Amino acid sequence: MKTKHQSYNVVIALFFIALLTALPACSSKKQAETNEPWYTKFANNLSTADPYQEVELFYASNRASTGKTVAADYYTDKSGPLTWGSCSVTIPYDEKTGSLQKSNFTIHTFDKSPAGSYDLLDIRALPMRGMSDNIDIRFADNSEKATLVFVPGYNISFEETALLTARVTYKLQFNGATLFYSWPANGSKLDYISDEQTAKNARPQLLEFLTEVATQTDTNAIYLVGHSMGCLPLSEVFVDLKSSLDPDDMEKFKELFLITPDINRNVFTNQIMSLMAGTETKITAYGSNRDKGMKESHSQRAGVRLADVKTDLAPIKGLKFIDATAMETSIDGTKYYEKKGTVLGAISATIHKDEPCPYSK
């Protein structure tokens, strides 16, 4: 028995010796993994479709709140007081676009499945100053300090606006702060006339929102993007900004992009564009005779719209008008026809100062 116990003791001793011998190796391996630069894994993940991508968006809205906590049901299509906040949207990987450019506003969560679609994850209500402070915190390590503000057209909900804004951000490869303004569109094609009036009524709140962005954040450059009916209040408010802001703050507005603007051409020329004279902001409108939204507009309104492409129309002084009939003017991913370039591609080239799009001449 004594011999048997001695054998056990020998085995146990050998086990502990082997364990102690292995520990330094395990420790060294763990230490090596700990010392591995974080950007190595980051770069490896960005080279594939693996990252689970999110983008943080900031917003303001004069929609009434439902009182619910579910993000998709947070706001109604009724008018309410101006509110501020932020939200997160997942971004699916697109081989043609690649991964979203790294920025302080992009979240890459590893070890998760790739996002399969654009989804609104959450909404975080913030006071006005809270939103501005959060933007500045993100700007702390962002040398460009650029801001993109998107104003959508009619027939769109708050949730759809958030998803569309995320898509616009992704396609533009914009690496600054992206914000959007959600006015209470009814979300139905049958409410075109009602939405038009609602868009006009949102003008004071939109002015307050853009004034806050220009004067109370550390942004150096602001790019305004309006779509369809959203171009009307955005253009009118731009005139208000020109007359109310100090020159230094007004200089922050670098570009005003109007995508298929659903505005009466004469109204824009005589009542809006005439008051923009002297501004340093570059103003570009993309028109198309194939845009579905404009076809709906013509069924509701008589007269020439700013987005109409006609050979007998005189140029509007101070406005760069681009015939985008051969381009894809849809910004929600819906393909109207076989296109030659996209409006978002042309805008991206302008913002990033790349070679101009051959179809934007």
Image (tube, rainbow, N blue to C red):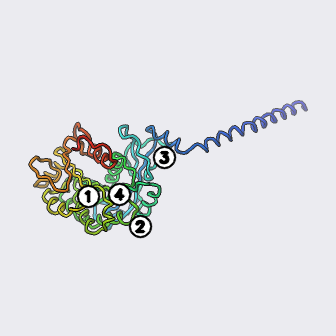
Q: What residue type is labelled 1?
A: Ala
The three-letter code of the residue at mark 3 reads Thr
Which of disc 1 and disc 2 is earlier in sequence?
2
Q: Which element carries disc 3, helix, strand or loop?
A: strand
- Rendered residue at 24%/38% (across/down): 340
User: What is the CA distance from the residue labelled 4 to the residue labelled 3?
Assistant: 29 Å
Residue 306 versus residue 291: which sits nearer the camera?
306
Q: Position of residue 70 (x, y in %)?
A: 40, 56
Q: What residue type is labelled 4?
A: Ala
Which residue position holds label 2?
129
| Separation (CA) of disc 4 from disc 2 | 20 Å
Looking at the rendered image, the disc whose residue lies closer to the viewer, 2 or 3, is: 2
Q: Is there any visible trace of residue 80 in the rendered image? A: no
Report which residue position mark 3 lands on. 109
In the picture shown, does residue 55 fall above or below 116? below
Q: Quadrant of residue 147?
A: bottom left
- Lateral position of residue 50 relative to residue 336, left or right: right
Rendered position, 200 above or below 91: below
Answer with mark 1 or mark 3, whichever residue precedes in sequence: 3
Mark linked to residue 185: 1
Which numbered disc flags the more N-terminal residue, 1 or 4?
A: 1
Residue 352 screen position, x and y as percent: 34, 48
* Other residues around mark 4 within 10 Å, as few (<14) / some (14–19) / many (≥20): some
Question: Residue 221, labelled with which disc?
Answer: 4
What is the total number of numbered labels drawn onto the structure image?
Answer: 4
